[in-house]
Image: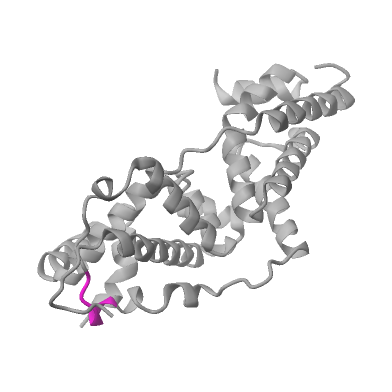
């Protein structure tokens, strides 16, 4: 059914319409909350708070964004508060993670990559990438995940995260470079005649 | 004259389809001539492809899904008087 119609019905008190609006986004909200908190229990609390807040604020939703994006904005606010309250210890600066190799690539000899599926099973690739994304600070992993897993535009992400579009692009790029480098460690075709670093 | 590093942000925008045609042509010309940028371009593209493929979310834990549905329903009833 049309999202606008479901919203109108939900705002009039139709619980089934609300469930239809929320259900397609629950898994992604949970994944995002987990990404931000690094903790399944906290992620569960955030998702529950998000849906309860969505009920409380349902009348204020004006359909200026999609319902899913609105839910993201609530989950991101809750996640941000969580991060502020429980600032992770030993957070590694992205500069250390990137170690300078990829953004000065003209001084390095990059390697061609093998077909990833010839190196690892699809499930191993998924696990490897998920673990690599987990290594990134949330300020980088969240824009990246919103861009490439949730397929939001740079503008939508910038609005959600209250960043400029330039800052959003930069964070997405740096996350991408970090993940590229991680993948490079397992996919590059070795050349015995030359040392990369 | 632009260095390879100058093309990095543009490469990313190019891959996301967010560059204007004139800059696209410039990038394509550079990537066609520069082995390192070609390799960077290919590997960045593959990185995103793999991330998109791996982005399938896990199911919510069953116990949590049940608890969540109940909490949402209870909250709804508190607000609207029925579910």
Specify whether residue A163 is in view. Answer: no
Rendered location of residue B15, percent (x, y): 29, 55
Residue A100, magenta (yes or no):
no
Residue at position x 67%, y 28% in the image: B62
The front one of B20 and B3 is: B3
Q: Is residue A60 above or below residue B22?
A: above
> Is residue A48 found left or right of B2 in the rendered image?
right
Q: Which residues are magenta?
A: A105-110
The structure residue drawn at horizontal position 21% and vertical position 69%, both measured from the top left corner, is B37
* Camera-side residue of A92 and A7: A92
User: Can residue A58 be seen here?
Assistant: yes
For the N terminus of chain A, the image quarter is top right
Q: Quadrant of residue B13?
A: bottom left
> What residue do we see at 27% from left, 50% from top?
A119
Q: In which quadrant is the C terminus of chain A drawn?
A: bottom left
Percent x, y of residue A4 = 60, 25
């Amino acid at each position: 059914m049309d999202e606008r119609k479901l919203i109108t019905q939900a705002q009039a008190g139709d619980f089934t319409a609300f469930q239809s609006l929320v259900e397609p986004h629950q898994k992604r909200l949970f994944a995002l909350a987990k990404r931000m908190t690094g903790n399944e229990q906290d992620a569960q609390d955030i998702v529950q708070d998000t849906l309860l807040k969505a009920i409380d604020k349902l009348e204020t939703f004006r359909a200026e964004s999609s319902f899913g994006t609105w839910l993201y904005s609530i989950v991101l606010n809750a996640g941000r508060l969580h991060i502020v309250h429980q600032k992770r210890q030993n957070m590694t600066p992205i500069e250390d993670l990137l170690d300078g190799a990829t953004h000065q690539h003209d001084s390095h000899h990059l390697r061609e990559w093998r077909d990833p599926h010839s190196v690892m099973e699809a499930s191993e690739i998924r696990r490897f990438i998920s673990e690599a994304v987990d290594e990134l600070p949330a300020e980088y992993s969240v824009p990246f995940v919103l861009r490439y897993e949730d397929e939001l535009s740079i503008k939508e992400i910038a609005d959600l995260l209250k960043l400029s579009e330039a800052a959003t692009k930069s964070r997405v790029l740096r996350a991408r470079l970090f993940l590229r480098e991680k993948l490079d460690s397992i996919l590059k075709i070795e050349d015995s005649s030359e040392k990369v670093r | 004259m632009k260095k390879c590093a100058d093309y990095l942000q543009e490469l990313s925008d190019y891959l996301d389809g967010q560059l204007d045609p004139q800059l696209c042509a410039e990038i394509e010309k550079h990537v066609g001539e520069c082995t390192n940028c070609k390799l960077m371009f290919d590997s960045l593209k593959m990185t995103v492809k793999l991330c998109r493929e791996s982005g399938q979310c896990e199911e919510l834990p069953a116990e949590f899904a049940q608890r969540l549905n109940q909490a949402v329903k209870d909250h709804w009833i508190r607000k609207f008087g029925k579910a």
